[in-house]
Structure formats: C-alpha cells, structure tokens
Image: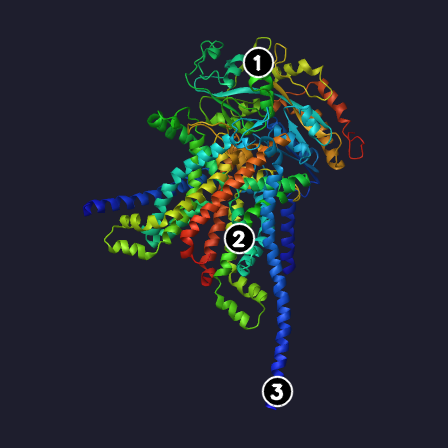
Amino acid sequence: MAGDVLEATWTAARRATGQGMARRNVGDRIFRLVTAAFALGLLAIVASIVLVLGYESSDAVRTFGLGFLSGSAWDPVAREFGALPFIYGTLVSSLLALAQAVPLSIGTALFLSELAPARVRAPVSFLIELLATIPSVVYGLWGIFVLVPWMRSYLGPALQATLGWTPFFSGPNYGVGMLTSSMILAVMIVPYVTSVATEVFQAVPPQQREAALALGATRWEMIRTAVLPYGQTGVIGAVMLGLGRAIGETMAVTMVIGNRADMSLSFFAPGSTMASVIANEFSEATYDLYVQVLVEIGLVLFVVTVVVNMLARLLVWRVAAPAAGAR
Amino acid sequence: MSYATRRRRDVIARSLTLACTGAVLLPLVLIIGYLIAKGVTSVNLDFFTQLPKPVGETGGGMANAVVGTVVLILLACALGLPVGIGTGVFLAEYGHTRLAPLVRFCADVLNGVPSIVIGIYAYTLIVLPTKTFSAYAGGMALGVIMLPIVARTTEEMLRLVPSSLREAALALGVPSWRTTLRIVIRTARGGIITGVMLAVARVAGETAPLLFTAFGNQFWHHGLSGPISSLPVQIYTYAISPFDDWHRQAWAGALVLLTLIALTSLSVRLLTRGRFKTVR
Amino acid sequence: MRTLIRGGLATLLLVLTFGGSAAAQLQLNGAGATFPYPMYSKWFNVYTQVDPQVRFNYQSIGSGGGIKQITEETVDFGASDGPMTDEQMRAAPGPIMHFPTVMGAVVLTYNAEGVSKGLKLSPEAIAGIFLGKITKWNDAAIAADNPGANLPARDIIVVHRSDGSGTSYIFTDYLSKVSRDWNNKVGKGTSVSWPVGLGGKGNEGVTGLIKQTPFSLGYVELIYAQQNELPFADVKNASGRFVAPSLESVTAAAASVADSMPDDFRVSITNAPSPDAYPISGMTWLLVYQKQKDAAKGKALVGFLQWMMRDGQQQAAALHYAQLPPQVIAKEGAALKKVTGPDGAPLAK
C-alpha cells in the first residue's frame, strides 16, 4: 500500500520533471540561439569589414599590385600612387614613440609592481589609466598649442645644437613633424604598455623574488635576476601592444605631423602616416581610383595592426595567462 | 663588487623607476593644467546653450555638439550593448563550443582595428547607400568600436560569478537559461555596467570615425538621418583653424569632453568599489 | 507622477532626435570649399532669418571634398573654387551646374620677422619658392623687387594645403600659366604633388600653421590673412605691375572675363590681362544638380541662390570678397531657370 503511493508519487514527479525538462530544453535552446546570433553578428561585422576593405580597394590592388607598397610617388594629379611614404611615416613615428615610451613604461611598471607601497600604487595607476582616457583630439589640441611651439623654440634648437651633425637632427625644425608626433604618441601609448608590463611583472611567482632576496640580493638585483628575465616575453608583448596602438592612432598625429607625403631621414621633417593620409584625403578624393587607393591603405593598416596585436596577445598570454587565471 | 657599490646601484635604480613614474605623470599634469587654464574661463552658459557663430565672429557655443555627442553615444549603445552583451554571454556560457574561440578571436581583432578604418567601413556601408551623412552612420561606427570592449568585459564578469550560485539555482530546478538571466547576469550587473561605461568613455572622444560619417553641423541636427555635430569633431575643426575665438572654444570643448569622460570613468571606479566588489 | 516622467522622457527623446530645430522644416547639407567658408557661414546664418523654415548646413572640407560628395550625392549641394573637369562631370550621375557666388584673391601670406606688409613678389619668385629653387628669404630673386627691404637670411618654410583644395587649384592654375617649369613638373589641380613644404588642412589649417611658424610663407584666401592680421604680398600681374590683393583688383580681374563668360560658368580668372587686375584671383561656385531629386529641397536651394544673387551680394564686401559683375549675375539668373524638380518643371519663380 505504502509502496504503491510512493510509486505513484515517484511516477508523477518523474513525469512532471520530464515535461519540465522538455520545456527547459526549449528555453535553453532559444537562449543559446539568441546569444549565438549576437556572437554571429560580431563575426559578421568583422567579416564585412574585411570584405568592404577588400572589395572597395580591388581596383587599386589590380592596378598597382605589390608595387603599391614600395612606390614612393604620391601624385593625385598624375594618378601615381605609392604607399611607401605613409608606411615609412607610420613606422618611423611609431618606433620613435616606442623608443621614448618603452623605457619610461618599464621603469614605471617596475616601480608599481616591485617598489611602490600599496598606498601609492592605487592612485598612481589610476592616474596612468586616466592618461589612456584622454581623447586623441585633446592630445592633438595640446600638441598644436603647447608641444609644437615648445619644440620649435626650445627642444628643437637644443637638439640641433647638440646632435645636428647626425642626419636625424639636421634640416629645418618646423615644430610640427615626425619627432613631435612621436612624442605625443609616446604619451598616448605609455598607459597601455605600463599597465600590461605591470601585470606581467606581478605575474612573476613570488618564489622567484624570495629566492633572489634570500640569496642576499638587493631589490634592483632581484629585479634584474628574477623579475626582468621572467617577464621578458610578456614585456615584448606589452611593447607590441603599444606598437599596435601607435600604428593606428589618427587624430593627434594628423594634427602635429605636418602632412607631407615624403620620406626624410630627419626627425624634424614633416611626414604623413597611413592613418593620417586617410583622415586628410578620404572625404575629398575626387575620383574612384584615388578612393580605392586610400581604402587599400586602410586595408594595409588593418592587416598590420591585426598581426601586431595578435603577436602581442600571444606573447602576453604566454607569461601572464597562467597566473591571471582562466582567460 | 662591494656591498657599497651594490647598495648604490640599488638606490640609483630605485630612483630611476621613480623618475620614470614622474616623467609618465608629467604630461598628464601638463595637459590637464593647460585644459583648465585655457578652457575654464570659456565654459559658461553660452557654451551649453548657444550655437556656433559664423566664422570670425566672437561668441557662440557648442550646444549642438554637446547634444550631438550624447545622441551619438546613445546610438552607439543601441548597437553595441545588445550585440556586445549577447556575445559576452555566449562566450561565457557556451565557451566550450567550437564557435567560441573564433568569436573571441574576432572580438580581439576588432578591438585592435584603428578607428579610422571603422570610419571607412561605416562610410561605405551606410553613407554611400543612404546618400547622406548621418547620425546613424556615426553611431554605427562608434557602436562597432564599443562591441569588443563590451563583449570581452561581459564575458570576464560572468566568469567571475561563483559557480556555487549557478549550481544552487540549477539544483532548485531553475532552467539554465533563467539561471543565466536571473542569477548570473544579475550578479555580474555591476561588472557589466563597468564594461559599458569604459566603452562609452572610449568612444565619447573618438574623432576619426566621425569625420566622414556623422560629419558636422553648425545648426541643430535635423533628425537622425542627417549630419550631426559632435564635440570631438568640433574641437578638431576649431583647433586647426586660425581664429583665436575658435581656439578658445576648442579648449573649452576639450575641457568639457574630458570632464564628461573622467566622470564616466570615475563612476566606474565607484561602482566597482561598491556593489561590485562583493561579487569578486 | 509616472505619466510626468514618461512625458519628460518622451520630450527628451524628441529633443535628442530632432535637436532644437523643431521649428525648421528642412535641412539642406552642403560641403566643399574652405575659400568662401567665411562668406557662406555668414550667408547661411543670415538666411535663417530670411527663411526660418530652412537650414543650410555647410561643412568646409575642401573643394575636392565638395566635388566628391556631390558626385556621390551624399550632400544636397557642393562647393568648389576649381571648376569640375569634364571627366568629373561625366562621373556624376546627372548634369551638375556651376553657380558662381563670390570672387576672392589667393594671397601669399607670410610670417617673417622684419618683413612688413607689401612684400613684392614676381611670378618667377613665387614659382621658384614653391618649386623649392628659392629657399632663402634674402634670395636675389626676391631682393631684386624689394630694394631696401630687410630680408632675413633664413630658410623659407613653405606651407601648402594637405587636402583637396580649390584654393590650391586657383594657385596652381596661376603658377601653370606663369611658369613653364611648374606646368611641366607639377601642373594644376585641387591636390598636387608639392615639391616642398608643410601641409595644412583647409585655409584654416594653412593660416594656423603660418601663424604658428616663424619664417613661413603660404597661400590662403584674402580674408584668412586679414582676419588673422597676417601680412600679404603684392604680386606682379600680366601687365608687369605690382598689385595688392583687394576688392578692386579682384573685380578688375573679373571684369576682363565678364563679357566672355561661358554658359557653364567654368572659367579661370587668374593672370587676367587688365593692368589693375590682381593675378591670383578666383571665382568660387556652388555645385547643384540640374535635376533636383527632392522638390522641396530643390526649391529651397533655388530660393537661396536667388537671394544670394540679390541681397547676399551686398554682404560680400564686408568680408572682403568681391561681388560678381552684373553681367554674370544676369546670366546666372537665366541659368537658374534650368534647375528643375524631379518632374522636370523649373523651380525658379
């Protein structure tokens, strides 16, 4: 008797849950489909960016081929287009920026991860993050009215006086130019490099540090023997991340680089980057081929930044990922 | 090497890192100092209520640009939030599926795409077919830039929700999709909002993708399917102009823009400090 | 309470969607030349009182941009100081008409300590400077025309436009006429491959750069130099006289072509033969589709053009632009009758 009741309850419960399961599965399936649709939406956007860039530049690619990347003429009147001056400008300004930003960032990251007391660390890293939130156009504004005059009247002449004999600091100093834009870029990428480098250093296992200290190392010796070697790959990743930022940066650079499609060894010389030439000429390129050529520069820019960013991620992950958990 | 030398090197190295930190913070002080010094006197009622004056005449304000920036951000959110959060949920909940790594990869790719390239994309896809520069095109460009930031922070925040919460809900017989919606997302709400705010702070200052999408407007925008003014573009136009009065207003505009962004990031800080910390 | 909040939200949404311009019925968008931008922004501002129903939004992105965007039909009207070439006209989806609005002078403006207003420049000197053959302020080619002037032994920093520009078109059109070397090496166009110099975006950007850069020299529309109190040069014209850019000297240049104005108004007035003419004078045009797709917008556009030819012209002098000669206005009025709505009926009253 009692067994029958139990049995009946059991069956009823099972039936009920079974129905519940079915309904639940439908709900789950719908939910999964909806979120998957959004995810596919993101995929579609990325795919369509590639398609748009590829399709809208196909004529230019066909006309100029690979020579486009090595051609140095940029003459819209004669319909001669070569991207080399912009690739050169992008490379030089970005590398110059790295040369300034990387030592500063690593120093700051070491300070934050190894030396600063917790009380100082939080506000300082907040301020550095704040540097990353300043819009590009505000950097540009500051560049035009503060940095450029300063470069023209003080830093430029001083560099000419001391290093003017090298090809890099010869020639007229306009105030605007490669060096000025690289300085702005350096300020802009410092927060990215610093924060990733700090993370990388923090990921160094404490045992490493403790071992060094136990052997009687000073803080600096500990950093040199335990932290830096361990973090090397990650720091390179951080630098690459900064490079990716610098390459794609547009407004601040456009405002202080001088906008000239030319290649010069002098860091004082005005130049142009892939991003700045698009910003300057895209809305006014008067014939199809001209537009196509600018889109092709956009495509090159896209490919370069994607490759640089992916490399950066790989490098950072190899170091920081195991410590940072399941990312 | 004597201990004294080693000691000295240590001191030098420590001071160097300190000097680096100082050098990194110096530009921040300089930029904010200049913004306040040059901008603060021009941030007045006119700035928020008046339209720009014709070239060369003094006075006027950026009311249309302030409103325009708000409109563009709202439009960006309309695209960026559902797709971004949806993608984030997908990545967190169905991270084991074959689609997930590809989506994650694409989000990272998108995050690295220079904003000017997104501008070309929105111009080709929206401005050319609709035959007009529009707030929609600008909002779409900004929305695409927001997407990966929102998606990845959502994913990370959802992963931070303790699995015990999820298991408890499932054990009570709550379907897994409702668990995700009612329990997991709700718990991670603070974190998701943080991600959204960060994304908003990032796109609020974007100029390059707006140059040939939202374009500009010296009057109020007239519906969303026409050009619209925005603070960053207005600052750019004024900054490269030769007119002193426009320079004055560019500084004011930059100060206002930076204040808006700083307030957004600051509220993120407060949010993460308050409710959200319990989640962690 | 709840309805109040809802009402408030709805109003906010409306304001955000339509801005504060709910009063205006129509907004027309235009883009192009920076050369006449001070004039246009004044006109479009005044015109909000003439016809409160219409707003003309004009963005000065450069003449190249004006031509490009009108061709793509992304704007309702374009503006350029260089006439569209035949090839560009063919690329457009329909016939485009050029309507002259005002005339102005492209001046050589400079920022060189010790060199005062009224530096005298010959066409040879100008071409030499922009070809990079004359690099110093005290070069013999400049000194010869400026006896007694205190010319510094400094490098000339040349500033030109970085964007597609009608001002560049007028300037290079002039240089191509006066210098064979320039014609062979560079040619004329809205954007050319500059042998030397820094690039600035728009007349605004070039003026800004010159103002910021000591010992620089560049070319801008007259008003940009005047509003910024920069000195500008007298240029030797076709009849060998040094003429300062002014309303009168631009008008004199236009007078020489007024009677021979072609029907499509695409004409160059650089290096005009008249002895009083300033040689680097230019005309600037609005670019309008002959067949308007939107009757309301077309009507508004024609209305504005008619106002511009009558009342608008009176305001030109205050901003140092020269009025169009009466013959040109008369001819333009006739041309305006050809602008039609989508049904093919003329829009002009």
> Which residue was labeled with disc 2?
B104
- Seen in the image, is C318 located left or right of residue C142? right
Q: Nearer the viewer, residue A3 or C97?
A: A3
> Which residue was labeled with disc 3?
A5
> Which residue was labeled with disc 1?
C180
- Residue B43 against residue C209 in the figure, above or below: below
Which image quarter: residue B211?
top right
Chain under disc 2: B
Can you see residue C18?
A: yes
Q: Nearer the viewer, residue C164 or A223?
A: A223
Labels 1 and 3 in the same subunit: no
Q: Amino acid at mark 3?
A: Val
Which image quarter: residue C39?
top right
On the image, the x and y values in percent for residue B262 come to 47, 48
Within-10-Å neighbours for mark 3: few <14, some 14–19, many 20+: few
Which image quarter: residue C176?
top right
Please report contact status of discs 3 and 2: CB closer than 8 Å, yes or no: no
Circle 2: element type: helix
On the image, the x and y values in percent for residue C89 come to 70, 27
Residue mark closest to the camera, 2 vs 1: 2
- Residue A86 against residue C221 in the figure, above or below: below
Circle 1: element type: helix
Chain under disc 3: A
Chain under disc 1: C
